Image (cartoon, coloured by chain):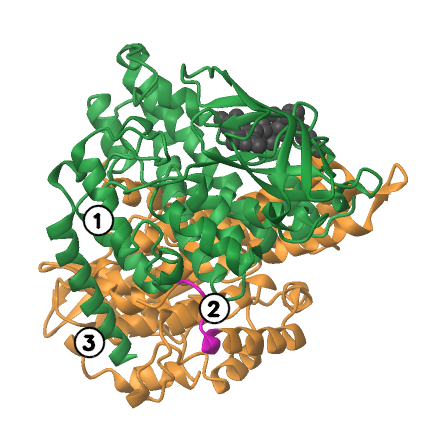
Amino acid sequence: MGQETTDLDRFREQTREWLQENCPEAMRDGKADDANICWGGKTWEFQSEDQKTWLHRCAAKGFTVPTWPTAYGGAGLDRAREKILREEMARIGARPPLLSFGIWMLGPALLQFGTEDQKQHYLPPIARGEIRWCQGYSEPGAGSDLASLQTRCEDRGDHWLVNGQKIWTSYADKADWIFALVRTDRDAPKHKGISFVLIDMRTKGVSTRPIKLISGVSPFCETFFDDVVVPKHQVVGDVNRGWDVAKYLLTHEREMISASGQGAGGGRSLGAILSDDSGGLTDACLRAAALRCEVDALAIGLTLERYKDMARTTGVGDASAMLKYVGTELNKQRHELLMAAGGSDALIWDGPHGSRPADWLRTKANSIEGGTSEVMLSIVSRRVLGLPA
Amino acid sequence: MTGLLRTEEETMLADAARGFLDDVAPVSHLRGLRDAGQTHDPALWADMAAMGWAGILVPESAGGSDMGHAAAGVLAGEMGKTLVTSPFLSSAVIAATALRQVAGRNDALSAIADGTRTYALALDEGNKFTPGSVDCAARRDGNGFRLTGTKKFVVDGGFSDRLLILARTDEGPTLFDLPADRAGTKRQPNAMVDSRDAATIVFDGVEATGDDVLGGLGQGLDILRPALQAGQAALAAEMTGLASGAFGMTVDYLKERKQFGAPIGSFQALQHRAAHLWCEIEVTASAIAHAGRMLDADPENATLAVSLAKARATRTATDAVIEGVQMHGGIGMTDAFDMGFYMKRARVASEWLGDYGYHAETVARLRGF
Ligand SMILES: Cc1cc2nc3c(=O)[nH]c(=O)nc-3n(C[C@H](O)[C@H](O)[C@H](O)COP(=O)(O)OP(=O)(O)OC[C@H]3O[C@@H](n4cnc5c(N)ncnc54)[C@H](O)[C@@H]3O)c2cc1C
């Protein structure tokens, strides 16, 4: 214990020094919204030279994916050290160097289910921000009932042939590759005929059409597969067992979405922000609602920490649905309060990025994307509580 | 600071406590006491003391096990699950924490640890928790003092051996440690809704010496603060145990009760409410664990953690019992069924040591509202 404490202290010190030397001044404003964040990928245009430097330095150090093994581009940090890194970054308001679906979703799934070849081939470019991934799960007829998906994937001997349509594919128009759920056995029970495939978006027959959101941005698309040829080795996990991979990945996605509201406000409490906005938070109803939200935010933040520790020991399993549910509902509430405190000032539309009304509208998707709140509650009631179907 | 997961030691403590309490103090034990017109079972407390529970916050030099606040929370949580009535919070948590702030109180602490002496905290005067406002006066009289005033909601004060009393002196609020039967002390036990003890106590010129002062004159609130926080954290843990106890009964009933030819737990309206409650209990459990860890690691800065825990626990326990009764239908309203006991205890525990509003305000103050 004593030795470990000293080691951790030393790691904190080294990390602090490294950040001090390597994090560009301009990357210390704590901003993590769409307009200021690096998503990487082949077509990525850096928003500034500093953004590029910051990404490259972090990637070289393994800090874009601190917990991944060093062999795949990570820093191999354990939970305690990863937390220290996060704390030290938060202390100076460092922006995350890179956000991506590759980091949150595909990476963990590959680490768990991928072959050694797949890990070596796909993981390092994710860590370096060179390849950007999107997620092809939902279809027009398969939303909450995801396992009813119909995109067809046929075995053509030396390759797979994919035909069908995905929808709500976030950033499909900007992504280099897609990880998709496809049906490889039409006769099996619906969960047992699904496979998890990786497809290069430049393959002939892949096309996308953007859809505009109520928040004004157009981050997601319809994605079409028209006789798309996919090499055999691009299936992750066993054929027809893609549902296992999909579910594993969803738990990571849900954790990520549940945490998305946590950093908001640059560490300031909701009360402090609202007090400034509304001249002291004198409205009794607003104050009571904000206080309740603050109490919940603190407790939910602690719960995220507790569950991260649990994930590394006993595992979390279906209980991750709880994190997704409470985290996203809280975030929606938070933004309702920000709008209320802002009054008419908050109604002024200054574009779809980083403005208060745009953020407010965007949070409404939090309890839909990655599985709706109702679906989360059903997962908890069936699989955690064991209530009958 | 250790993380929020239970340590192996804490898990063993919880398992041992559960085994013991299921044996000797299921809810039927509380019911039995109530039916017999009693509020507390001295034999049960003696057994708990023999297991080291009464000394869980008493230093080893005074014969305690000194396992800390997180461990005390583990025990309180297990007691909450089956509504165990005992002077654990009053004596083992609040009084022990107060007494150990002051040098030279080893005898009192030993007597708490071995269960031979119980304490109650005589603090409240109005009908809400406002620890800073004290009317009860200790006036100079020769070398000593005379206490005059009335204390309300003195939990376990109807039977405790001693009282910690906060009274005003010229130097400011001061804590007195007196035997509960000192001349001029009139104890009136009240019939509380949760069938446990809480007394109204009138002090009519009660004599106190300088030795009876705990700590210095005017230092009452300083000594009391850590003790109150310890009590609030443990009570929050009890309430969260209570919530999961009530919730466990509710989920069992959802699986067992049939209507419309199906278990009622197959109806989504009830499933989602149950799932929501489970989420609430999980989130609150994190705040409870955090409060225990903060009190052990950094007590000077534990105020936010403790108030967060009590605020969340109050809401969660209230939700759990309201939903518990509703989802049981008619049977939930009957005295023969246990859910009512949970509802009653949740209400009393909500008020004791500060309600939701009190603790939410503390959060507000510390979070820049
Ligand atoms: C901003 C955004 C980004 C997204 N990004 C992606 C992406 O990158 N990739 C991807 O594959 N998908 C993505 N999605 C899709 C998302 O996962 C789906 O929208 C979601 O799973 C819900 O499916 P649906 O829209 O078909 O709604 P439906 O399933 O039709 O649901 C409609 C309503 O019915 C409720 N409902 C449905 N079934 C039940 C039930 N059994 N019990 C109770 N209530 C029920 C739902 O909770 C909801 O309120 C994104 C969505 C949004 C909003």
Instruction: Mark 2 or mark 3: name the one nearer the start of the chain.
Output: 2
The residue carrying mark 1 is A57
- Marks 2, 3: nearer the viewer: 2
**Residue B186 in sight from this viewpoint:** yes
Residue B73 colored magenta?
no
Q: Which mark is residue B74?
A: 2
| Inter-mark Cα distance, 2 to 1 | 45 Å
For the residue labelled by badge 2, is the local secondary structure a helix, a strand or a loop?
A: helix
Identify the residue shown where x is 49% and y is 40%.
Answer: A326
Residue A224 pos. (x, y %) = 61, 23
- Marks 2, 1: nearer the viewer: 1
Report the amino acid beneath label 3: Val
Identify the residue shown where x is 65% and y is 52%.
Answer: A384
Chain A tint as drawn:
green
| Inter-mark Cα distance, 2 to 3 | 26 Å
Closer-to-camera residue (A261/B239): A261
Chain B tint as drawn:
orange
Q: Which mark is residue B102?
A: 3
Crowding at mark 1 (Cα within 10 Å: few <14, some 14-19, many 20+): some
